[in-house]
Image: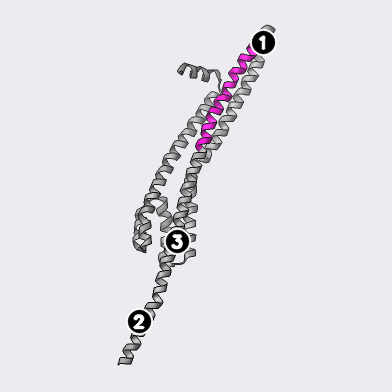
Amino acid sequence: MFYSLARFFQMGGFFMFPIAIVLAVGLAIAIERWVQLKRIKDANKKTWDDIHPVLTKGEFDKAREMVNDDKSNMAQMLGMGLARQGAVRRREDIEIAMEESMMEIIPQLEKRTPYLALLSNIATLFGLLGTIMGLIEAFTAVAGANPAQKASLLAASISTAMNCTAFGLMSAIPLLLLHARLTTTTGHIVNSMEMAAVKAVNTISTFSKRQFERSPSLTVATTAGADHVQTTA
């Protein structure tokens, strides 16, 4: 098995080495991005599971303390919104603050992932280039060969040249699949953060509305009590 692979690689010619380097770089990027996105996804889920019950109870000061101590992307986004909630309490300002935070976070999630698609195309092009160069060498070699041997020599040379294209495609296809998988995972993380932002804003708005509805009632009750005291006096 190892001997067959080594012979396949050797018969492909010089351009097998650039393709191998492209494949190695692509796999390194894919592994790094996968580990990073998995860590971010788990951290975001833990942060939301911890903070959501606190927001539901209306304990916004406690929520601000929790996100300040947390370094996850979810905490960064919620922290921006909670900072606006403590200052102005307007829904529009909270939404804009969270959107601003998302604009900073999304490029961090997507960085280096587009390189996989680029490296996939480069691997394919290196394979085609290697095959073309191999065919040029093959036709040049058989030009002065014995006519009886030209067919067999040409067939062998073309078979060897095709190894480069085959290896280029074998490298490009996994890189494209990895790019698609990482892009999907990034999309899931962004969607979960957007959903959390909407839930957080709705929770804050609902709590503020309840507080506002209670305030007139308390004011009326206080005024009525004061009038009663003055009448009694």
Callout 2 secondary element = helix
**Label 2 close to label 3 by CB (< 8 Å):** no
**Amino acid on which disc 1 is placed:** Lys
Q: Quick check: can you spot residue 111?
A: no
For label 3, the residue is 201
Please say if 40 is above or below 209: above
Neighbour tally class for label 1: few under 14, some 14-19, many 20 plus, Cα within 10 Å = some
Callout 3 secondary element = helix
Q: Position of residue 201 (x, y in %)?
A: 45, 61
Residue at left offset 61%, top offset 16%: 157
Label number found at residue 222: 2
Label number found at residue 150: 1
**Amino acid on which disc 3 is placed:** Val
Mark 2 vs mark 3: which is more N-terminal? 3
Please say if 189 is above or below 99: above
Residue at left offset 44%, top offset 58%: 199
Callout 1 secondary element = helix
Where, by quadrant of the figure, is residue 34 drawn? top left
The image quadrant where one finds the C terminus is bottom left
Q: Position of residue 93 (x, y in %)?
A: 48, 64
**Label 1 close to label 3 by CB (< 8 Å):** no
Q: What is the magenta range? A: 150-178
**Nearer the observer, 225 or 82:** 225
Q: Main secondary structure of the magenta part?
A: helix
**Nearer the observer, 50 or 147:** 50
Residue 197 left/right relative to 225: right
Mark 1 vs mark 3: which is more N-terminal? 1
**Nearer the observer, 191 or 40:** 191
